[in-house]
Image (cartoon, rainbow, N blue to C red):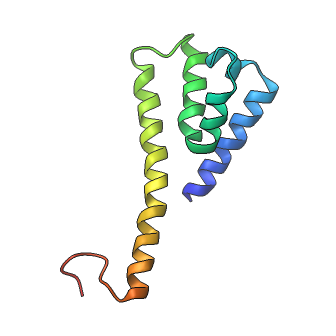
Amino acid sequence: MAWFVSILARLALLFIWFLTPLVDRAFHGGWLLPLLGIIFLPITTLVYVLVYYISGGVTGWGWLWVILALLLDLGAHSYNASSAARARSRRAGIPSQPGSV
């Protein structure tokens, strides 16, 4: 499910970038940070652009939303890593949790 959300966030960010000037305003015309955001942290980048649009800048409580989006992105990445580690340990016959059989 996390991959679906990140794909939707990437698509939404691409549409916003190509159809509106919001991404250019939020990143002051730069293209490298939005591109890296699309690749690595799409939800964080999308929320940053939306908060910048709504409040005219990211200050105060706006950073709370950006940090929450960052935690959501990091959680989506860590879920994939932990499920891969569990699958490797099952194949090797090692219990995934200490003390479990």
Q: Residue at x 49, y 45 (%)?
A: 73
Return the residue found at the far left.
Answer: 99
* Number of numbered discs on residues: 0
Residue 33 picture location, percent across and down: 61, 29
Nearest the viewer among 52 and 90 is 90
Decide: is 69 above or below 88.
above
Side of 96 where 76 appears, left or right? right
Residue 60 picture location, percent across and down: 39, 15
Nearest the viewer among 1 and 21 is 21
Quarter placement of the N terminus: bottom right
Quadrant of res 35: top right
Return the residue found at the far top.
Answer: 56
Q: Residue at x 47, y 37 (%)?
A: 69
Residue 62 picture location, percent across and down: 45, 20
Quadrant of res 48: top right
Decide: is 48 above or below 44.
above
Q: Residue at x 70, y 38 (%)?
A: 12
Decide: is 72 above or below 33.
below
Return the residue found at the far front.
Answer: 32
Side of 97 where 72 appears, left or right? right
Q: Residue at x 70, y 19 (%)?
A: 24
Quarter placement of the C terminus: bottom left
